[in-house]
Every structure is written in structure tokens, then in C-alpha cells.
Amino acid sequence: DKTAGLKNNIVSLHRYNGVIYIGTFVKTYTIDNENKINEVKGIPDGIVWCFLEPTQNKSLLLGTKSGIYQLAPNKKVTPVFKGSHATFLYQSKVNPNRIFSTDDESLISLRFENNKWIFEGRWNGIKDDIRYLQEDENGEVWLGTFIHGLIKVTPDYNNITTPKSVIYYNQDKGLNTL
């Protein structure tokens, strides 16, 4: 709480290298071994939506209001993608060197290559308030939206930002409610 140094509501939590990371509406914090709350420096003020530990390196990725940031084991913070509201981070099962995220109402992907993250682009045909992503065993990507139902995306893995198909499942397509 505020008396312990935590200012604002908690949005996300993650344990990384034995340390608890706390994302709030305003800042990112850690709790040290003495239960003291410390601010993580180098991340712009604003909501911290999520965390992801990708398997390619020993870093921690943070999805924030200002894009995606990487925290190295030495606690150095570097921007990976400057954008707006990276509300989730999802590592691909088909290609673990790829992560999916959002940039406001766009689906984006980044690829880890030569020890750095490369922005692949915004996906064509998808512009919605995406809240959730799941990749199935066939490599199809399912997106949950805030008010427009589900989106089934069949990626073209040779041209990742131009899907083979994008199908919306909403009340017109058989969902009883949204």
C-alpha cells in the first residue's frame, strides 16, 4: 500500500530472477528481500499492462502504455518498440523467436534475431480493441476483443503481417452474447 511506498493500483505482477515486479497505472516497482518497494528506473510513467520472459534470452519484457521495454538481468532498461498500449505480450509456439502484442488497436509482431528485437509490423485487416491472444496447435491465432467477439487469424508465415484470412466471430456469426 501507500505506506510501504506503492503508489497506485496494481495491474500486473511477475517474478523474474527471484524478484517480484509490480506494474501499476503509473510506475513499475520491485519488492526487495527486505520487503522494501523500489521504483524501476528507465520505464516511462504510465500503465504497465503485462510482463513476459521470452525463452531466447534472459530478459524480461514489459508491455506498457508507451510500448514494449526490455529489462536485462543487469537491470538495464531499453526500449524494444515505442508505441501505444502494449496490453499483452505472447510468445509464438510456432516460432518462439516471435512475439505478438498490441499497438493501441493494431496487432503487431516482433522477431528476435541477432540478439535484438526487430519490429515486423502491424498486421493487415486487424484493427480492434484486442484483449487476449491464443495460438492453437495449427498455428492459427485467436484474438479476443473488448466488444466485437473473437477473431480467427490464419497467418502467412512467409509474410507475417499479411494474414491468409481474418474471420470475425460475433453475434452475426453465432455468438449468443459479446
Image (cartoon, rainbow, N blue to C red):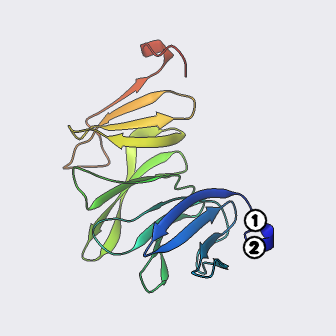
Instruction: Judge left or right: residue 97 versus residue 42.
Output: left
Q: Secondary structure at mark 2?
A: helix
Q: Amino acid at mark 1?
A: Asp
- Residue drawn at x 54%, y 17% is 177
Please give the label number shown on residue 4: 2
| Residue sitting nearer the eye, 7 or 42 | 7
Check the image and report above or below for 170 versus 140.
Answer: above
Q: Amino acid at mark 2?
A: Ala
Residue 61, position as x, y percentages in the image: 44, 67
Please give the label number shown on residue 162: none
- Residue drawn at x 54%, y 40% is 129
Q: Say few, some or many: other residues with alpha carbon within 10 Å of mark 1 (under 14 / 14 to 19 / 20 or more).
A: few
**Quadrant the C terminus occupies:** top right
Instruction: Judge left or right: residue 113 versus residue 107.
Output: left
Marks 1 and 2: CB-CB under 8 Å? yes
Check the image and report above or below for 138 versus 6.
Answer: above
Instruction: Judge left or right: residue 152 versus residue 164.
Output: right
Q: CA distance from mark 1 to mark 2?
A: 6 Å
